[in-house]
Image (cartoon, rainbow, N blue to C red):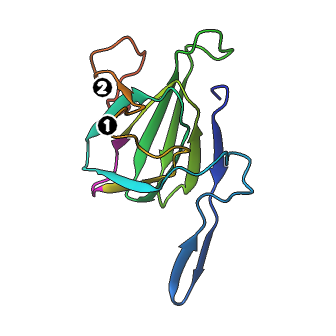
Amino acid sequence: MIDGVLSKKLKVISDERGRLMEILRNDDEMFLKFGQVYMTTAYPGVVKGWHYHKKQSDNMAVVAGMMKIVLYDDREGSPTRGEVNEFFAGPHNPILVHIPPLVFHGFKCVSTEEAIVVNTPTDAYDYREPDEFRVHPHENTIPYDWERKDG
């Protein structure tokens, strides 16, 4: 696992009325502080990435559809520099992925329907000076291929 990355299996509580799933609690190991909560989606086969943050950590959970969340550690001095982590997240594998600052990340919808990600970053989005730094999803030096791996 990339240094500083944490994951937590999410507990789904079901009854005859529906489901409840806690995503992030203030007593979780990965909880640092609250910035905001937002959702983002991707249509089937779409890749959203790569980007990283200099200050904020992300806490991502997929609540509909399935996503492949991929992380790449390019941090100088990191004991896991060069490492790639893949997480398959969604109702079939309900997990929370904690992504520390400076770790590249992105995701791809791998389900046949739109996938929905709920993110609880540690900082609110600053419209004047966004803490978001992007590279092209396919044309870059990150050693990762977004294509499906059959076999």
Please name the residue shown 42% across and 41% down the image: 68
Residue 49: give x, y in percent of width and height. Answer: 34, 32
Which labelled disc corresponds to residue 137?
2
Q: Are marks 1 and 2 in contact (CB under 8 Å)?
A: yes
The answer to whether 123 appears left or right of 117 in the picture is: right
Query: Relative to 107, is 19 above or below?
Result: below
Residue 26: give x, y in percent of width and height. Answer: 69, 57
Q: Report the residue that reaches farthest toward the front.
A: 128
Q: Nearer the viewer, residue 131 or 9?
A: 131
Dot 1 lies on which element?
strand
Dot 2 lies on which element?
loop
Q: Which residue is mark 1?
A: 48
Quadrant that contains the C terminus: top left
**Bounds of the magenta span?**
108-114
The answer to whether 121 appears left or right of 12 in the picture is: left
Which is more N-terminal, label 2 or label 1? 1
Tell me which amino acid carries mark 1.
Lys
